[in-house]
Image (cartoon, helix red, strand yellow):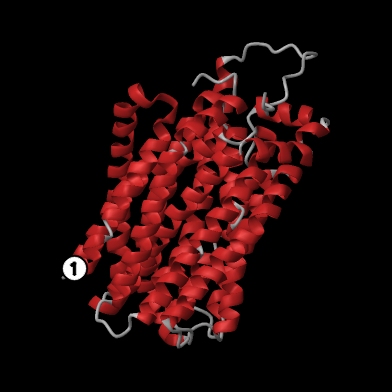
Amino acid sequence: MPPRFVSPPASTSTVCLPPTSGTRMKVGVIAWYGLLVLIIASVFGSMDRQILVLLGEPMRRSMHMSDTGFGLLQGAGITLFAGAAAVPLGWLADRFGRRAVLAMCVLIWSMATAACGFAQDFTTLFAAAAGLGLGEAGLTPIVFGLIPDIMPEHRRALANSIYSLAGALGGGLGMAASGGLVHSMDAIRPLLPSTLQGFEVWRLAFLAVAMPGPVVALLILLIRMHPRRASQQVLGAGRGAYQSQHDMSSYLRTHRNTLVSIFVGIGLASLGLAATGIWLPVIAARRFGATPAQIGAHIGAAFVIGILAGAAVGALSVRLLHSRLREATPMRVISLGAIGAALAFLPLLHLRSVNELYLICCLQCVSLTAGTVLVPTIMQDITPVALRSRAIALGSVAIIGLSSLSPVLVGVLSDAFASISQALPVAVTIVGTCSLLLASALFYGTEKSFVRTVKALHPEAEL
């Protein structure tokens, strides 16, 4: 029989009295405050990444970069370094506290974002982008590990969905806000210190989005654990078995098929998503002459509309499929969403206006959101409580490693196809379609393994 990893039992020496309505209300307010702060941190993390994408074309011209160089900046500069930092950050979070490590990550990526604004050549810009990746590496494993710590169990799935939707919506609104920020830079330039007034607009935008970082870090430190989770952590802290490398090795060995299939599948889906998120703004600017403000506003609107529609499609899909697929439903919904997103790439080859580009972005958001709102719960369900941040961080290495290939692959293919007029759209379509179809096949093939893993890790749960 495979080993089962469950939370340490509650102390038998303490008498637990029924909570009063006032206590329940106070715990609820504290829990929802924590979730709100995590959403805020995610939104600002998205803005820091989006500003690098939104300003990609003016930054590329200023730094005299090729498409391959810009792809390396986005891929190796940010994503690959994030993969290298994910595991040690996950270990630090499980060992020393998820709130403190997440606050440290916010400060790191804020300083790195500001450093992007001061970069004078490709080398210093690459180093700053690497720092941005290092800071943001802890966001996913720590947040997904922290949500069950601050929310009551019966609210966990709801909290995961709210976090995913709010974070995605915030990303869309952040894109629009970033575009507006870029547009307003010239207006506020006279108010800036004399040393900054001569900076290019894209440099000032980097400095502006870095400013809220210390405040967000402080808000994270004020998050409080759910009382039951806090007592379990204190009790489990004295039990080395729940933190040992032996448990991690046994867990990885026993459930490797599920973990590899799911994390590689998410990595391939992220690879396809990055092809859209990074390069569609470049296509809009290069082919149709759209300004950063226009791109931010329209792609931000496309994200918001697509995410809201995708959430509705995902909920409907779960309801229609659950009676037949039961516990395997999340994997099937994600698989179908990946197929839909892959098909949405094909119209890129026949673009006639920039509005069609925004429509493609919206359709992809619908398909991807339908499945990705389930990802946090899936990750939590396939990882044991005491090892959660480390286990998700290990999976994040595969996810980040694969997604880091996207900007480089698209850039190399675009430069290779430079002789044809549709070089960049063709490159984006090839990379995005192939990666998403492969991801869909992996999700579909791991349905049975996923159900076995969840039942083994959480035998007490009602599946």
Q: Quadrant of residue 384?
A: top right
Residue 192 relative to residue 6: left or right: left
386 over 460 or under it: above or below: below
The residue located at (54%, 58%) in the rendering is: 400
- Return the x and y of residue 144 as percentages of the image width and height: 56, 42
The residue located at (26%, 82%) in the rendering is: 420
82 over 285 or under it: above or below: above
Toward the left, the furthest residue is 352
103 over 358 or under it: above or below: above
- Return the x and y of residue 332 as percentages of the image width and height: 38, 36
The residue located at (66%, 59%) in the rendering is: 85
Quadrant where the N terminus sits is top right
70 over 456 or under it: above or below: below
Check disc 1: other Cα within 10 Å, few if <14, some if 14-19, many if 20+. few
Residue 137 relative to residue 291: left or right: right
Closest to the observer, 439 or 271: 439
Closest to the observer, 289 or 255: 255
Answer yes or no: is residue 412 visible. yes
Closest to the observer, 109 or 415: 415
Query: Which residue has dot 1 on it?
Result: 350
- Return the x and y of residue 365 as percentages of the image width and height: 32, 51
Residue 17 relative to residue 153: left or right: right
The residue located at (34%, 73%) in the rendering is: 282
- Return the x and y of residue 249 as percentages of the image width and height: 72, 41
Q: Amino acid at mark 1?
A: His
Assign a secondary structure to mark 1: helix
Residue 292 relative to residue 76: left or right: left
